[in-house]
């Protein structure tokens, strides 16, 4: 079974604007329970999915701290392969990770459009609405990609 790497943003994906506004962001990453449930649906349905954290939180917390916070949300830390470079912009750090690690399949899950229409990674993006975060609508898009024949 080939792994599918998901570049995972947090703000606007695993939380919403309201979550962020009502959270104490100095103590931990603000996660929204409903968005975490949506992520768990993907994990349960597709055991080949692994995550690389591309969120700007990678600049605040170490990989181990992120894994611990995800574990507190019920996400198995071993599913997290790593983080993209905190020294580069999000799009450049994702591109660098892909070029260095060469995953067979990957999805970029973010509330921002990171790559323009003509870019080779454009079709690998699944965009969430930052006001809602990850919902069933995006899960369907992710499923289409995972089930797509190589």
Image (cartoon, rainbow, N blue to C red):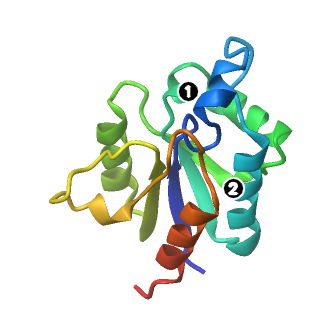
Q: Residue at x 36, y 54 (%)?
A: 98
Q: Between 44 and 20, which is closer to the camera in this rendering?
A: 20
**Residue 50 locus on image (x, y percent):** 61, 59
- Cα gap from disc 1 to disc 2, whole angstroms: 18 Å
**Residue 134 locus on image (x, y percent):** 61, 52
What quarter of the picture does the C terminus occupy? bottom left
Earlier residue among tags 1 and 2: 2
Q: Residue at x 19, y 58 (%)?
A: 117
Residue at mark 1: 57
Vertical relation: 132 (above or below) 105: above
Residue at mark 2: 39
Q: Secondary structure at mark 1?
A: helix
- Which quarter of the picture shows residue 143? bottom right
- Which quarter of the picture shows residue 22? top right
* Mark 1: few/some/many CA within 10 Å (<14, 14-19, 20+): some
Vertical relation: 137 (above or below) 16: below
Q: Between 6 and 15, which is closer to the camera in this rendering?
A: 15
Vertical relation: 3 (above or below) 9: below
Q: Is residue 93 left or right of residue 136?
A: left
- Which quarter of the picture shows residue 90? top left
**Residue 20 locus on image (x, y percent):** 64, 24
**Residue 35 locus on image (x, y percent):** 70, 48
Query: Which of the labelled discs sits on residue 86, or is there none?
Result: none
Q: Is residue 114 left or right of residue 150?
A: left
Q: Are marks 1 and 2 in contact (CB under 8 Å)?
A: no
Q: Residue at x 33, y 29 (%)?
A: 88
């Amino acid at each position: 079974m080939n792994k599918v790497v998901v570049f995972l943003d947090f703000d606007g994906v695993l939380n919403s604007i309201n979550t962020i506004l009502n959270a104490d962001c100095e103590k931990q990453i603000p996660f929204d329970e409903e968005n975490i449930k949506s992520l768990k649906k993907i994990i349960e349905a597709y055991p080949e999915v692994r995550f690389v954290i591309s969120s700007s939180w990678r600049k605040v917390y170490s990989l181990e701290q992120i894994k611990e916070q995800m574990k507190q949300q019920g996400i198995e830390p071993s599913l997290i392969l790593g983080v993209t470079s905190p020294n580069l912009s999000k799009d450049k750090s994702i591109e660098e990770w892909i070029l260095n690690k060469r995953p067979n399949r990957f999805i970029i899950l973010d509330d921002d459009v990171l790559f323009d229409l003509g870019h080779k990674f454009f079709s690998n993006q699944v965009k969430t609405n930052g006001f809602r975060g990850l919902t069933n609508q995006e899960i369907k898009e992710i499923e289409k990609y995972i089930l797509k024949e190589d």
